[in-house]
Amino acid sequence: MNASPGVRLAAAFVSVVIFIVFIAAWHAATQGTSAVQGMDPEYAKLMGITATSGKSPMPGPLDVGAKLWEHLKQPFYDKGPNDKGIGIQLGYSILRVLLGYLLAVLVAIPLGFLIGMSAVMSRALDPFIQVLKPISPLAWMPLALYTIKDSSLSAIFVIFICSVWPMLINTAFGVAAVRKEWLNVARTLEVGAIRRAFTIVLPAAAPTILTGMRISIGIAWLVIVAAEMLVGGTGIGYFVWNEWNNLSITNVIIAILVIGLVGMVLDQILARIARSVTFPE
Amino acid sequence: MEKFIAIEGITKRFPAPGGGTTTVFEDLWLSMARGEFTCVIGHSGCGKTTVLNILAGLDVPSEGAVIVDNKAIEGPSLDRAVIFQGHSLLPWRTVMGNVSYAVSSKWRRLSAKDVTEHAQQVIDLVGLTGAEHKHPSELSGGMKQRVGIARALSIEPKIMLMDEPFSALDALTRGTLQDEVRRICLTTGQTAFMITHDVDEAIYLSDRIVLMTNGPGAVIAEIVENPLPKDRKRTDFHKHPRYYGVRNHIIDFLVTRSKSFAAEQGATFDRRNVPVVRPSTSSSHDGDIDGLVTSINRQVRLLNTTKKMPRGKSLKERL
């Protein structure tokens, strides 16, 4: 979308206003009420500031900001299995997503070509795809843990299984929908099957395939958090669960924010690749 | 006549909805000589495009065969280039990319430099110099069709097959492209087969005009030999004394005879030896002063009758 500079400026202004209003509301909502009067000092010590000074148990934006700054200053520290920097945790998650996702690309795109080009394979594989597609990827987890016997690999498998379907279906659709006139051009030029696949079908179906890949990376990033909560050990999902057990709501909020930012970056990378293969007609 | 292309008794049938079959055309016979420009005219649905696709090898006839250069055709070939109605350029490739794709398909061992060089020559030939690096979406309709022509020419085919190549263009662009195609075909001695709806285009470009009756069950009714001289110019070919004879003959066919032909001729019509006609100035509709006067008188009479007609009658009834 190409908005005019005026529209862009106005939109940026509104975004900033919404952000400020949100932060202000959050700050106001988590402000402490007045201090509790007449409490036995010994008892007050036991109860902590939440009870004694009326401080809200929910962290405010300033608490989160301060904590975030701490994390950003030192993202990659490693103080044993339960205390690693948020950068390291994110690194594990991204690595798992990329491995599972690449595996899915390697399977889904060739298989999608096969389904898209062959009416027989399309019909033959359709019932399997229809049954397997709606299964929640986490439902595969116990089976993966049982057969693979490695929690980290199981997480990668779960990423693979959830990102394979959109890519497979979109590739098959894109390949099947290549315009007949373009295929006829290749036929009249006596272009062989392999060259036709790479020079006509692939570029013609690329925008559709990339749409599938973009949906897949989004799903993969959604699923990795849940998968890591289950398998534990490392990763941003594990970090969220661990900080919940530590009752560090500040860290949980930071993790939520970071998960959103990374997801956006992954999506934007795929969007950029999709733009580069899209052709105007 | 030397038969360079021979269409021998081709029939095309499709399964009709609700059982049975629909015969688009039946038992077509037609031959073309080397270097000849043939146009096919007929109403929509008479199977012209199917005939062209069969010639291209993109479609197969239900019966019969097509022989090109003494060989029955089996599928598409680089010897027969097709200029498609909807230009069919690959939108992700530039002008150069589209033409060089064809060049490198024909000569697979050619180096990239030679491919570009050859493609450039053809691009220059169709007057697209300077637009090599544009994508089809950045080109006007006329320029797109020029790329289509360049792509077809670049493989140096024995036959050019054109499916209403200029139908989507405005009159001015169409005129220029017709000139280009005629010039190229004359200088290279190209054999060409073209489908058109435009009678003037057919008269300007072709040596022979094939008239097809309406489908289903279309047949070739006549082959009109173009009486205009070979060195005709687009600017004045319509002033040639024999122009109106041909034009009226074809239009009469399209308006009336294409519908009634099958009923009139019946089973006695010899499809293998289609009559060849050469309309002359002695035709009754030759566009001379007498003809013009008759036509004007008829229109005046028509106007008068129209006035007397009660309202609400359809035009068809008035005529």
Image: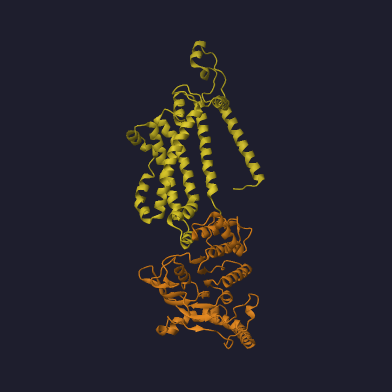
Chain colours: A yellow, B orange
User: Furthest residue to the right?
Assistant: A6
Whether residue A113 appears in this view of the structure is yes
Give the position of the C terminus of chain A as an image quadrant: bottom right
**Closer to us: B206 or A44:** B206
User: Furthest residue to the left?
Assistant: A146
List x then y, in percent, for residue A208. 48, 50
Question: Which residue is rendered at x = 56% and y = 65% of the image?
Answer: B149
Residue B132 vs residue B108: left or right?
right
Tell me where residue B154 sits by quadrant: bottom right
List x then y, in percent, for residue A198. 47, 52
Question: Which residue is rendered at x = 45% and y = 30% of the image?
Answer: A235
Tell me where residue A272 sits by quadrant: top right
**Closer to us: A98 or A126:** A98
List x then y, in percent, for residue A209. 47, 48
List x then y, in percent, for residue A5. 66, 45
Residue B75 vs residue B183: left or right?
left
Q: Above or below — where is B58 with respect to A246? A: below
Question: Which residue is rendered at x = 47% and y = 29% of the image?
Answer: A89
Figure label count: 0
Q: Above or below — where is A213 with respect to B264? A: above
Q: Above or below — where is B96 with respect to A25? A: below
**Closer to us: B79 or B313:** B79
**Closer to us: A49 or B274:** B274
Whether residue B86 appears in this view of the structure is no
Q: Above or below — where is B18 with respect to A196? A: below
Residue A16 vs residue B211: left or right?
right
